[in-house]
Amino acid sequence: GIQVEQSPPDLILQEGANSTLRCNFSDSVNNLQWFHQNPWGQLINLFYIPSGTKQNGRLSATTVATERYSLLYISSSQTTDSGVYFCAVLFSGNTPLVFGKGTRLSVIA
Amino acid sequence: EAQVTQNPRYLITVTGKKLTVTCSQNMNHEYMSWYRQDPGLGLRQIYYSMNVEVTDKGDVPEGYKVSRKEKRNFPLILESPSPNQTSLYFCASRKGYQETQYFGPGTRLLVL
C-alpha cells in the first residue's frame, strides 16, 4: 500500500548543529509538503516541494521524485526548531494528504 | 490575513452531548478536510470536501458528520461523542488538487 516513512524518528541536537531529515514515499506523488508541529501543537507550513530544491532561511528541502524521497535540512539549529517535523504526500489518484509519523527534534542549548 | 480558523480551540464535554467544531477559511479554497491526531497513530483524515455540497469519507469517518453549505465553512459534528473521540482535531484547506494545504490551529477535545 501507499506509505510515507520518515527517519530518524527522534533526534537530539546541540544548538548550532546541522541536521538532515528524510522522507521516503512508496509511489509517484502530486504534492509533497513539510510541516513543523511546534510544542503548542500548531502545524506550520515549511515547504511545498513535489520536486526540486527550495530554501527559506536556515531551512532547505530537496525532493527527488524519481527516486521517491525528500530531504529537509536544518542548519545552525536553534531551540525554537524543536518539535515534530512531518512529511505529507499527495499520491497520484488520491485526495488526502498522507502523513508520515514524523521526526521529533529536540535542540538543546 | 489568509488563514484557517477553528473554534473552539479547547473543549471538554461528556459522552453523548452533541457538539460542533467550526472551521472557516478566507482563501476561497475548494478543498477542505478534517484530520484527527492521536499518539502513535499520527494524522488521519476524517472527512473531506472538494466543493460546496460535495463531501466524502476519509480514513476514520465513524462517529462524525460534516456539511459544506458554503465554500468558506466546513463544520465537524459529533452527534454522540464518546471517549475514543478524545483527540486533537485539525481543519485544513487548499486551493486545488496540487496546491499547498493549510491547517487551522487545532482543537483539543476531551470526552469524559
Image (cartoon, coloured by chain):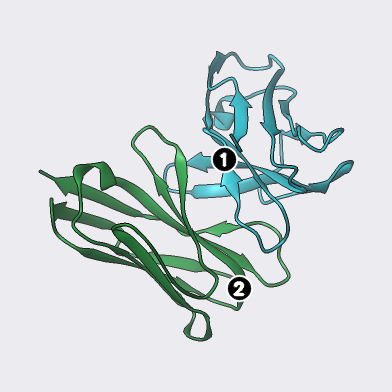
Chain colours: A green, B cyan
**Label 2 to label 1, Cα distance in Å?**
23 Å
SS at circle 2: strand
Identify the amino acid type marked 1: Arg
Which chain does the residue under circle 1 lie in? B
Q: Is residue B50 above or below residue B20?
A: below
Which residue is tagged 2?
A29
Q: Position of residue B83 (x, y in %)?
A: 56, 25
SS at circle 1: strand
Q: Is residue A101 visible?
A: no
Which chain does the residue under circle 2 lie in? A
Q: Which mark is residue B98?
A: none
User: Horizontally, is B95 left or right of A63 in the view?
Assistant: right
Residue appearing at x 52%, y 80% in the figure: A65
User: On the image, which quarter does residue A54 sit in?
Assistant: bottom left
Which residue is tagged 1?
B36
Residue appearing at x 81%, y 38% in the figure: B71
Q: Is residue A4 visible?
A: yes
